Image (spheres, rainbow, N blue to C red):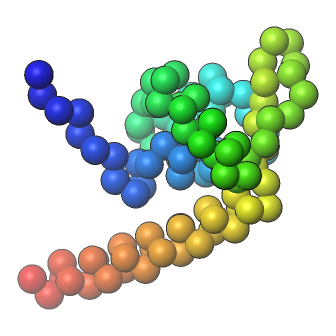
Amino acid sequence: MPRKAKLGPSSDPEMLILTSLADGPKHGYAMMQDIERFSSIKLGPGTLYTAITRLVEKGKIKPDRIEDRQRPYRITEAGLTSLSEELERMQKIAKFGIRRLRFS
C-alpha cells in the first residue's frame, strides 16, 4: 500500500484551520468547505477533527455555543499570533526560494 504523502507547512491541517477561522467562527463542515475553496486541499473529517482537538488543547481555538446541533469554533488571540508568525515565516521562505529559482 502506498504511503500517504506528508503535508507540508502550507497544507498542514492546523494552519489551514487557523486560516479558515481568521475571518470568523465556523463549524467543522464549513471549515472543510472553506479550506477546499482557498487551498484546493480536501481535509477528511478524521484529519479535521483530530487537528481541531489539538488546536483546542493548545489554546489556539475554542468552541462556541452549539447552534442547530453544530459546534462552531473561534480562533483565540494565541491562535491569531501563531498564524501571523507562521505566515510571516512562510512568506520569508517563499521569497528566498523564488530568488534562488531566478538565479538557477
Q: Is residue 1 left or right of residue 57?
A: left
Residue at figure coordinates x 44%, y 70% from the top left = 90
From this view, report whether residue 98 is shown above or below residue 87.
below
Q: Is residue 78 left or right of residue 84?
A: right
Extreme residue toward the front, this view = 57
From this view, report whether residue 38 is shown above or below residue 69.
below
For the C terminus, give its image quadrant.
bottom left
Residue at figure coordinates x 60%, y 42% from the top left = 54
Question: How many discs mark residues in the rendered view?
Answer: 0
Q: Position of residue 101 (x, y in %)?
A: 18, 78
Q: Is residue 4 left or right of residue 52?
A: left
Residue at figure coordinates x 12%, y 28% from the top left = 2
Q: Is residue 83 left or right of residue 91?
A: right
Q: Position of residue 64 (x, y in %)?
A: 86, 34
Residue at figure coordinates x 59%, y 72% from the top left = 85
From this view, report whether residue 82 is shown above or below residue 67.
below
Instruction: Say which of 35 and 12 sits in front.
Output: 12
Q: Position of residue 60 (x, y in %)?
A: 70, 53
For the N terminus, give its image quadrant.
top left
Q: Is residue 67 visible?
A: yes
Q: Is residue 22 visible?
A: no
Q: Position of residue 46 (x, y in %)?
A: 49, 23
Extreme residue toward the bottom, this view = 103
From this view, report whether residue 88 is shown above or below residue 27.
below
Instruction: Say which of 99 and 74 sits in front.
Output: 74
